Image (cartoon, rainbow, N blue to C red):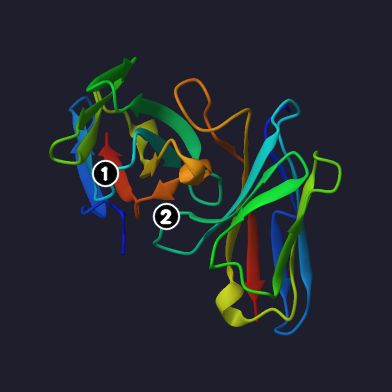
Amino acid sequence: DTGVSQDPRHKITKRGQNVTFRCDPISEHNRLYWYRQTLGQGPEFLTYFQNEAQLEKSRLLSDRFSAERPKGSFSTLEIQRTEQGDSAMYLCASSFAQPSSGNTIYFGEGSWLTVV
Amino acid sequence: DQQVKQNSPSLSVQEGRISILNCDYTNSMFDYFLWYKKYPAEGPTFLISISSIKDKNEDGRFTVFLNKSAKHLSLHIVPSQPGDSAVYFCAATANNNAGNMLTFGGGTRLMVKP
């Protein structure tokens, strides 16, 4: 499977706990994105990496959220002190270059987070 | 401010007929548009895209039309098949520094009845 891979697919955690999600992008893609999707809504942009550099962060990304891509390959998204409002699907995506004709963003299957 | 809107939350179509999904946007800087299809508990799957220099792009049963003056795009599926039943999202991006992110609409759930 050469698509975008995310782990774990599902996570149930108690409020206040920390969680970490991992994303492995398509191997030749140097751009990696994190999005969040809640029920009934479209995906919302969280942050973006080009290689190991984090170039954009949404205002949705509070200080409890941190994302890393240490070697420009896989990425992790950590949520500290989880709150019930963090319950969502966290989507990772990757692309070879800036979205345009011929350069599409491809999404992984997502990581479901439920905070109880 | 919702910059990309899909005003129909759901659409039901008979198998074999045409499905038309609509999307409106407000940001005139958007110059590249994409449609994604999403099944429950899965990530969005890329379907088709269109650049603002075109007004139509076709790929098999799927055609996307872009009306820049109206800031409107639509996805036509002909003929519709039961396997097309899913949630469809339109997304837009701009070819500038903010062009690294996609802005999505809220989605339209398509149900194709056999």
Q: Amino acid at mark 2?
A: Gly
Let me know if marks 1 and 2 both belong to one chain.
no
Q: Relative to the observer, which residue lies in front, B100 or A75?
A: B100
Residue at image x 75%, y 75%?
A80
Rendered position, B105 above or below A31: below
Q: In the displayed image of the protein, which residue is found farthest to the bottom? A: A16
Residue at image x 54%, y 32%?
A98
Q: Secondary structure at mark 1?
A: loop
Q: Position of residue A86 (x, y in %)?
A: 60, 73
Q: Position of residue B38 (x, y in %)?
A: 46, 43
Q: Position of residue A113 (x, y in %)?
A: 65, 66
Q: Relative to the observer, which residue lies in front, A1 or B24?
A: B24
Q: Position of residue A90 (x, y in %)?
A: 61, 57
On the image, which quarter does residue B23 sit in?
top left
Residue on which the image places disc 1: B28
Q: Give the position of the C terminus of chain B as an image quadrant.
A: top left
Q: Which mark is residue A42?
A: 2
Q: Amino acid at mark 1?
A: Ser
Mark 1 neighbour density, 10 Å: few (under 14) some (14–19) many (20 or more): few
Q: Disc 2: which chain?
A: A
